[in-house]
Image: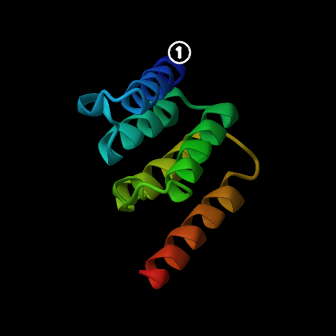
Amino acid sequence: DAGFQAECVLNRMLERSKQGFTNVEPDINSYNTVMNAWAKTGGVDSAKRAKAILERMENSSNKRIHPNTVSYSTVLDAWARSGSKDAGFQAECVLNRMLERSKQG
């Protein structure tokens, strides 16, 4: 499963960077790539995983990791591909979070 494998790589990068290997510290593109892998996998669980990665970004103390438009759009895509009955509601929640964060600067 591509999403799972991509997330494992991201977690390994985080572990290594905490050990002092700064050349493997994940950046916003790393996170976006993982969310995209989950989005392309499809299904409700994949959309939930993409959303969880987005939440990690939103809560990160690292200013370079805060989500951008690509981040939110990717999670919207994940919900669109999920086949979930409440995908519209979930997507609207993501969109509202993006709008709220953009107001905060």
Q: Which amino acid does label 1 sit on?
A: Asp
Q: In which quarter of the image is the C terminus?
A: bottom left
Position of residue 90 in the picture relative to residue 74 (left or right): right
**Disc count in the image?**
1
Q: How is the image coloured?
A: rainbow
- Mark 1 crowd level (few <14, some 14–19, many ≥20, 10 Å Cα): few
Rendered view: 9 above or below 104? above
Identify the residue shown where x is 51% and y is 54%: 60
Identify the residue shown where x is 58% and y is 69%: 97
Residue reaching furthest to the bottom: 103
Rendered view: 91 above or below 18? below
Identify the residue shown where x is 43% and y is 34%: 34
Q: Provide residue 58's location: percent of width, then percent of height.
A: 53, 58
Identify the residue shown where x is 76% and y is 48%: 85
Residue reaching furthest to the front: 20
Name the residue that disc number 1 marks. Answer: 1
Camera-side residue: 62 or 76? 62
Q: Provide residue 80's location: percent of width, then percent of height.
A: 56, 47
Rendered view: 63 above or below 21? below
Q: Provide residue 37's location: percent of width, then percent of height.
A: 44, 30
Residue reaching furthest to the right: 85
Q: What element carries label 1?
A: loop
Figure quadrant of residue 24: top left
Figure quadrant of residue 67: bottom left
Camera-side residue: 26 or 32? 26
